[in-house]
């Protein structure tokens, strides 16, 4: 961390600042020029509150050099994290998984039909929403407990592990048999929820918020990890920009950047990012080319009658084509890396 | 709502669509051209799921003409909503209030000293965080129950009503004596929290999310209102843009736009928007000139030692100057409107 | 185009509006409901000024259904445009080209050394800046006429066609032997320049502006095309968002979207988008997976001493690896499409 | 400027770097910790190419402490710049001016009628576009030379100095009698145009680009100033964000921030920022409250028939009300500052 002082700092305040920084177990190196004095702080600055230092009278600016996250940081954990989802199904460290299923669980027939279809095409994890974050209070909000029950039936019938979204910590007791708990983009900085999830032993898929930076995503992962749960899957699902043709802008660079900054697996959700089904397969394949550890794809047996997000859902037949392309792409990516 | 059909729609599918729309109590007007057929839907389209219609095979595009919110909509509620906070203190409909206080409650001395100072300068409502949403799990998270206790002591001592932020519905029982419950920007779309708050009888100050549109803010207000609680204060606190000199970009146009779209009062928080204390007074005054119903200002007796957000907090003396300018500005605004 | 009228429009004004629209050779379909009257305009609405209609007293809103561009529109030109750059080198319609070279031309040795290296690795077109748009007037601005001379020497020596950026129409006379004229992101809406380029017979590579939409990019292409020059290559080079870790956000979805909306070839420039050399190869490969018609890659023989944009330039050896991966990726993409 | 080195930098490369920096007349202070070595550069770093340093093998990061602009920098020019537009009409340093007129010049009657009306209401400078940057090549592009002729007639008739936009340096000869040359948002980084304008002796109104930072705006001013022309008026006209209800987001904080960073006058154009006439007066008044040195307002005698930007133009009667409010606001702002 670099602390740039204002011109002619008060010597007593400067001395106080230096003593305080040393009390945090930091080495302080002073570089004094004719115009500018700069302090270089060496040591573990993770817990130094940068805003607090910046507010001091004698401080002109503070710049962080090291990342403010530790447990999610590849610097301190060089090996890829591999998360075991179920017998034979793990993600990260070269293990790639396809997560597929409808936006919402709607009926026993719907979820089972989709589950069987996506499994046959190569998906290994079943998605389906029971609690749905909808912008409008008048829109379908999901089947709640009944939705989770139907997901569990589909799990029993197909053997696929399941992932579904939690919206409030009060719902946690329903998630006992759920294999991966999803935190949606709008809850990425619901810090109370993150803290609670840090105390569960379950894999968490954490979606990047619509206007959140890579660092903020990793800080939210750090919230969960600092509670003891280190099984985090990061998910890029599109960010909000000025472009309105697609629902959001899929930031595929998140894959190589997050994998450099962190050891956690990175999954891409092109369905929510694009919001238009016909562009999903192309972007899914591009994300795989960029090295993502998994994809999350919305598949519906009857998109025009989906109770939510129909426009972005592809049909099982389209998913089958997509899955074949993804498989071919994975082979190429693996051979190029090998 | 306008439904634009693809060229040569399947006649049976078109007939089904029309029947379904009519079953929603909508009048359907068909306009057929040589290239394009357009359906005009007349009636209450609030509960029509636009995504669902857009996903239909024969539909090229759907455009909403009426707003998807009703209770928050000035069209159906032309009079300004006036919210009574305490005896003699109301907001909206020409009633302007200054909310001031520290970012976080830190000690009995701190909160009482700040409260007395801001009251003397003309603030009528005391703010102070007990639960703090911090990006880093290693940063100060607030004093929690103890913080609320200290706020209540400051309320008892000064007679000022208090506002403080809720981060999780599990904290609600601590808010019994709190006068206004704040929902922070990161929880603007925490829909479960909004639903719960809709069942309380307390005024809610709802902050706009960092990347949320006016319409999304009003839809979140609608969530609370549709639960029965119509005492909502909207708050603009800066949006995230490409400019990084200030923390966020304060969108002052939110004042006239939100007040046209809705009858709810609109408050501006320049402290969080700017993130730099020395720009807060100027922007506060500009927001008042734009017609806001209140300001929310961070004031700290010792900003360099504030436990959070020190750089954006002004000192009580600066607040006193600000309050005088705001008072003069309010007089001018009132005289120009009169 | 859909014109939504305000409630109870003045009948005379409505009649005038309808007559005027008919005078533009448009069919006007009126759909009157109890609350809302809507006009559906059928015909060629390209030249209707949407802002002008929106400003009318009786108009509540106007929504365009057809795109406002014609020559760039795939609807009116379903076949891919193929642009012949040189003998045996064309782009679009399944023809893929690698454009590579330094950000700026710096010396005869530098440009020739890089040109030979990238050609050996499979690049077919040489890039190199002679006129450099730099944010600071104190930064290196390019070698100007001398730079173009050196590019032409490299062209003579290697046989590679060359592309270089024009910044002002006054420079055009120097571009006689240049094979592709590049319009940079900051000049995408320099409409006078576009008009002039529309009168040349040269292929133009048009970069998307940092905050421009797909439609605006296509409208700028339309500017050039409406002048008679239809040889446009569209180029996505990153857009400006709130994320600052990478210089810009590479919007790979531009590939499938632009190729659906338009028949023009689409090239990706990951070097400028990312701004960090080590992420360029991964994103280049992902862009190819998405189906782009070409790549534009900055390569420098000595990036730390490049006079501009060194951090984003890769070395010839890294380009050689990249080119091999791109070749393998192209084979896969072609086989999947086949 | 702070240069952060990678761990264990090569000693020879480090020595080379230090020698090179010293050759630029910079003092170099080395701060070596157990993990990190930091160089503090003291002296005039304006012309150090930050990207070039960042690209060096041994460099992890570079952070600028001083601004990269000099002539536009208040640090080196503490007094407000005052620009004399005409006899008795200057801007900056407490001098406030209202610029008003139509988006485009359309006819002798239109421009003269509007000019007389806005002058009567208190505007001192007449605006009117002769060269119009339009997104569509099929939209009205302005009257060109004829438009400037009409503006000059209105100037002769009313005595008002005029401002009009230049789009290409080739148009400059037509600007001999124009009092202020406007550079539009889309040309803010048309560096060739800026360089040419730096050689004229005319006041330049430089609009901030739709996605440009404060620093980039000041760097563009620096381009003009470094050519010898220091009469620059900065203009904020809205930035592009995710919010689409208004055309752009008016960033009023640009006023206090730019006035702190620079000595140049700052003008606000709420018409283009909002794009909706009925919100213009409120935002104009708010901008004045924030301390801007002038306003630029679109006024049209018949907005529904304006040939461009009708929806954002107000009528002369509305301008008269606006001007009265602005006058009252200026009095308040002046009295508060006094």
Image (cartoon, coloured by chain):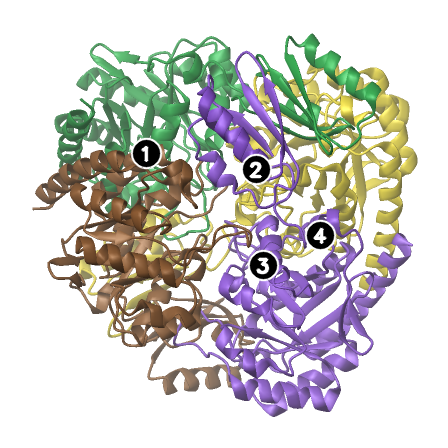
Chain colours: A green, B yellow, C brown, D purple
Mark nearest the camera among 4 and 2 is: 2
Disc nearer the start of the sequence (4/3): 3
Q: Secondary structure at mark 4?
A: loop
Mark nearest the camera among 3 and 2 is: 2
Cα distance in 3D space between marks 4 and 1: 45 Å
Q: Residue at x 57, y 14 (%)?
A: D33
* Residue topped by disc 2: D23
* Residue topped by disc 3: D223
The image quadrant that residue B235 belongs to is top right
Q: Residue at x 29, y 20 (%)?
A: A162
Mark nearest the camera among 2 and 1 is: 2
* Residue topped by disc 4: D262
* Residue topped by disc 1: A269
Badge 4 crowding class, 10 Å Cα cut-off, few under 14, some 14 to 19, many 20 or more, is many
Cα distance in 3D space between marks 2 and 1: 51 Å
Disc 1 chain ID: A
Residue B324's x, y, as percent?
A: 89, 46
Disc 4 chain ID: D
Q: Are marks 3 and 1 on the same chain?
A: no
Cα distance in 3D space between marks 3 and 1: 44 Å
């Amino acid at each position: 961390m670099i602390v740039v002082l204002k011109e002619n700092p008060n010597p007593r305040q400067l001395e106080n600042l230096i003593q305080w920084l040393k009390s945090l177990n930091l080495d302080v190196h002073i570089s004094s020029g004719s115009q500018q004095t700069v302090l270089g702080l060496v040591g573990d600055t993770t817990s130094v509150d940068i805003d607090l230092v910046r507010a001091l009278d004698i401080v002109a600016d503070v710049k962080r050099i090291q990342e403010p996250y530790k447990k999610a940081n590849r610097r301190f954990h060089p090996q890829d994290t591999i998360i075991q989802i179920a017998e034979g199904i793990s993600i990260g460290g070269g293990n790639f998984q396809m997560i597929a299923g409808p936006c919402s669980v709607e009926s026993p027939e719907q979820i089972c039909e989709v589950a069987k279809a996506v499994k046959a095409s190569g998906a290994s994890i079943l998605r389906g929403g029971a609690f749905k974050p909808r912008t409008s209070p008048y829109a379908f909000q999901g089947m709640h407990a009944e939705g989770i029950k139907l997901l569990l039936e589909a799990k029993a019938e197909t053997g696929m592990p399941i992932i579904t979204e939690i919206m409030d910590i009060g719902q946690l007791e329903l998630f006992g048999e759920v294999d991966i708990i999803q935190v949606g983009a709008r809850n990425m900085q619901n810090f109370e929820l993150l803290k609670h999830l840090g105390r569960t032993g379950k894999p968490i898929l954490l979606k990047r918020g619509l206007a959140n930076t890579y660092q903020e995503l990793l800080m939210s992962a750090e919230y969960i990890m600092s509670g003891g749960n280190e099984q985090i899957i990061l998910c890029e699902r599109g960010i909000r920009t000025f472009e309105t043709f697609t629902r959001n802008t899929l930031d595929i660079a998140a894959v190589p950047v997050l994998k450099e900054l962190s050891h956690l697996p990175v999954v891409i959700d092109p369905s929510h990012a694009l919001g238009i089904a016909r562009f999903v397969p192309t972007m899914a394949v591009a994300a795989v080319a960029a090295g993502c550890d998994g994809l999350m794809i919305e598949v519906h047996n009857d998109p025009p009658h989906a109770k939510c997000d129909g426009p972005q859902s592809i049909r099982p037949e389209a998913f089958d084509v997509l899955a074949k392309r993804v498989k071919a792409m994975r082979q190429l990516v693996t051979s190029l890396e090998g």
